């Protein structure tokens, strides 16, 4: 029997149990892919990660990311949660910027006081969405195609395609037909109205990840990264903003977006809620 250090980290919220949890297994090099997949299925969290020795000389550590059904090349809240667990377990970066290795490549991460932030990775797919697919998305979201203000592929690994609605209210009102959206990863975003919604955030986001066996993800770093690249790139969002996510799931996620020079940083709070050991 193998005993490994384990943490469960709450990401993207400073309020206990209101962010997105990720299970992190440290020094997991002894585990097989099958053991990793079995544990991720057992935790039944949106993602479970395994920290490993890096294979790149530039990386501080390597991570593998699993949903209950599949392995992902990259995901946002697992990136921040894994980095937090690595740091709190004694990890020391080679330089001021931490470098995570994952299947999508090397991801820079930095400390921002009480938050960690990662650089949005290059999109694997961008550009317009096929009209037939967009019609399927509108049907599955139970909205009129005319209520979609803009749309684009925002895929940085999980397969995201995204749509912009006219308001936070429209985003929160969605009651998708998940079965009709099987196999898709859909991001939906809409602006806050300062007069009625306040100024704590500027956009509301929801993430429907049927492709990974998760109907709705509470707070999603990879999606927010892709959304920021799309919306800032098209001038539809400012260079610095806060996205709110998770309200329909009784969460209070906050994702901090900052464009600096040619990099978009995606930041949020990271707090360990559970520590212990895993026996395999």
Image: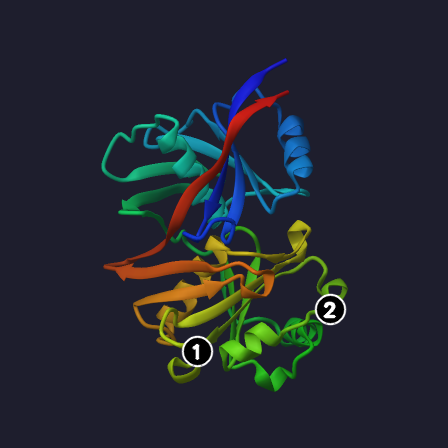
Where is residue 237 drawn, in percent x and y? 37, 73
Does residue 70 sit above or below 180 in this rendering? above
Q: Which residue is pictured at 39% across the width and 84% down the height?
A: 195
Give the image quarter of residue 180.
bottom right
Q: Which residue is mark 2?
A: 177
Whether residue 35 sits left or right of residue 243 in the image: it is: right
Whether residue 238 sits left or right of residue 122 in the image: it is: left
Q: Between marks 2 and 1, how big is the CA–CA gap?
A: 27 Å
Does residue 197 sit above or below 24 in this rendering? below
Quadrant of the drawing holding the C terminus: top right
Tell which residue pokes out farthest to the bottom in this image: 146
Tell which residue pokes out farthest to the top in this image: 1
Q: Nearer the viewer, residue 224 or 57?
A: 224
Tell which residue pokes out farthest to the front in this image: 16
Where is residue 272 drawn, in percent x and y? 45, 38
Task: Name the front one of labels 2 and 1.
Answer: 1
Q: Nearer the viewer, residue 249 or 226?
A: 249
Element type at marker 1? helix
Q: Which mark is residue 197?
A: 1
Q: Would residue 132 be visible to someone looking at this image?
A: yes
Whether residue 255 sits left or right of residue 50 in the image: it is: left
Quadrant of the drawing holding the N terminus: top right
Tell which residue pokes out farthest to the right in this image: 179
Give the image quarter of residue 202.
bottom left
Where is residue 107 drawn, in percent x and y? 38, 43
Give the image quarter of residue 83.
top left
Q: Residues within 10 Å of mark 1 (few under 14, many from 20)?
A: some
Q: Which sits earlier in the primary sequence, circle 2 or circle 1? A: 2
């Amino acid at each position: 029997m193998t005993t490994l250090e384990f943490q469960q980290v709450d990401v993207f919220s400073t309020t206990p149990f209101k962010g997105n949890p990720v299970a992190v297994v440290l020094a997991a090099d002894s585990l097989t892919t099958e053991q990793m997949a079995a544990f991720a299925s057992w935790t039944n969290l949106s993602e479970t990660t395994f920290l490993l020795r890096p294979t790149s000389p530039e990386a501080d550590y390597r991570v593998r990311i699993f949903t209950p059904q599949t392995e992902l090349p990259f995901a946002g809240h697992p990136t921040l949660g894994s980095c937090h667990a690595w740091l709190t377990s004694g990890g020391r970066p080679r330089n001021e910027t931490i470098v995570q290795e994952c299947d999508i490549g090397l991801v820079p991460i930095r400390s921002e006081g009480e938050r960690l932030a990662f650089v949005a990775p290059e999109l694997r797919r961008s550009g317009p969405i096929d009209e037939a697919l967009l019609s399927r998305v509108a049907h599955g979201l139970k909205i009129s195609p005319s209520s979609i203000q803009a749309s684009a592929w925002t895929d940085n690994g999980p397969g995201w395609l995204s749509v912009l609605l006219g308001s936070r209210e429209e985003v929160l009102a969605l009651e998708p037909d998940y079965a009709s959206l099987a196999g898709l990863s859909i991001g939906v975003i809409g602006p806050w109205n300062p007069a009625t919604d306040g100024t704590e955030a500027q956009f509301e986001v929801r993430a429907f990840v049927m492709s990974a066996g998760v109907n709705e993800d509470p707070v999603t770093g990879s999606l927010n990264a892709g959304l920021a690249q799309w919306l800032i790139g098209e001038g539809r969002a400012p260079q610095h903003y806060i996205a709110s996510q998770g309200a329909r799931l009784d969460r209070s996620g906050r994702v901090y977006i900052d464009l600096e020079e040619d990099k978009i940083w995606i930041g949020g709070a990271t707090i360990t809620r559970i520590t212990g050991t895993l026996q395999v």
